[in-house]
Image (cartoon, rainbow, N blue to C red):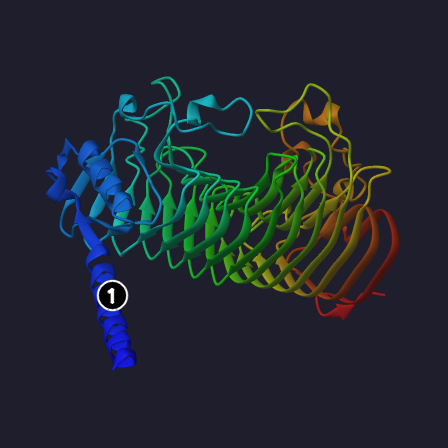
Amino acid sequence: MKNRFTFKTLCIAFAMLLVAQISAAKDFDVRDFGAKADGVSLDTEAVQNAINAATQNGGGKVIIPSGKIVLSGTIYMKDFVTLHIENGGTLLASPDYKDYPNNTHKNMYKNEPHMDRCFIYAEDAKSFAFEGYGIIDGNGYMKNFTRKKGGRPMLMRFKNCDKIHMRDITILNPAAWVSAWLYCNEIVVDGIKIRSRVNGNGDGLDFDGCTNVRVSNSSFDTSDDSICLQASMQDKPCKDVVITNCIFESKWAGMRIGLLSRGDFESVTVTNCTFKNIKDSGLKIQVNEGGTMKNMVFSNLVMKNVPRPVFMTFAQQKACVDAPDEMYPMKEMKNFTFQNIIADNTELDKNSAFFLTGMPGHNIQNIIIKDVQFFVSGGGTKEDSKKSIKEYTVETLEGWWPEFHLVGTLPASGVYLRHMENVLVDNFHLTVVDADARKPFVLDDVSNSNISNCYLNGKKIK
């Protein structure tokens, strides 16, 4: 009898606990907290009160309702909160700079304090999410935000956060970057759409010193780099990153890895992606602030109108806002594979090439480039073929970034490699449409190289 009573008591207790959990996991419609949701009235307080109530409840969904526009200034995400934007609903950023307070950390790039403020901020928060088929609109038009008008707030910034999910939402019109993820862990981004074209510096997803990052099934159309991997702090590496099944279109780079590179980078894979109409580079990989970078694979990529499918530099320059006065030492950059790539640049000019360069005495090591089809327009002259290319020295850079325009037209029509060791180029098919006086491959200060099974216009290069 005693055992039966105990079992019955446990069952009742479990049922009561289950009911309590179900009732606790509730929705928090911003209208219930005073939001007018008319796209005109400023609903910042209502949205924040809903977020606060959800986290105090132990978690829940804050609802931006369908068919409504909720206008807000800066809001702060909290533990266990899901911001759910219903299909047809819009969370719209205020067009007034004064609605963005200055307690949202800062931009980590030098000379850019006008991008310190942001629309959605979280610090030391855990397990929060953004979901739904609705829209987050940054309202970042130049009529609202310029440097002269006070600044251009980023759309999102998260610092020292853990376990963040972002699914299915559409993000539009930031005044600066879409997002800066600073020193965060366990990130999943899936099925989102980013369009950032109404103002400058419109980066998409910038992961700085982040670990365990997965981005998939998403599309990007940006006025600056679509995805960036960075490391602005020496003790915060950027590592264990997987990017797959994405589409990139950009006025600058599809993916940039580095530049902010005081910390280390390791273990990155990018697969099954397409790049189109990129002004600068598809994969832009750069170490210049003393960090190390190694162990990365880029495979199954298709590019159209991407002048430099791969642009890699190893140099010295200071990019971080917290950089010391002295220049950083150069450490190492090694272990990269680029495989199974098709790049069609026949609609572009002669400045189209795979361009990878270290510095004298500081080689990029262990590079594999294989199974590539590369189509270019040609047009290189004899003068181009004899051209001497500048090194990316501190004097050449003059305080700014290692960009292609500092060296200009290369003496190779397909691949230019400099200051490298242990290089394999295999099964590379280069097709040049018009006459080009340059060699298809130029290797300058490259040791232990193996160039095999390479073809120019269908004929094997001997």
Q: Is residue 446 left or right of residue 34?
A: right
Above or below, 282 against 148 in this view is below
Give the position of the N terminus as an image quadrant.
bottom left
Which residue in the protein does label 1 denote? 18
* Frontmost residue, 409 versus 75: 75
Q: How many neighbours does mark 1 have within 10 angstroms: few (below 14), some (14-19), or many (20 or more)?
A: few
Which residue sits at x=61%, y=29%?
319
Give x and y (percent) for residue 333: 75, 46
Give x and y (percent) for residue 57: 25, 47
Q: How many marks?
A: 1
Give the position of the C terminus as an image quadrant.
bottom right
Above or below, 388 against 1 in this view is above
Which residue sits at x=50%, y=60%?
274
Give x and y (percent) for residue 116: 43, 26
Q: Residue furthest right?
A: 448
Q: Quadrant of residue 264?
A: top right
Could you say whether the residue bearing mark 1 is in a helix, strand or loop? helix
Give x and y (percent) for residue 18: 24, 65
* Frontmost residue, 432 versus 151: 151
Which residue sits at x=86%, y=57%?
449
Above or below, 100 against 33 in this view is above
Which residue sits at x=87%, y=38%?
361
| Amino acid of disc 1 | Leu
From this viewpoint, is residue 437 visible?
no
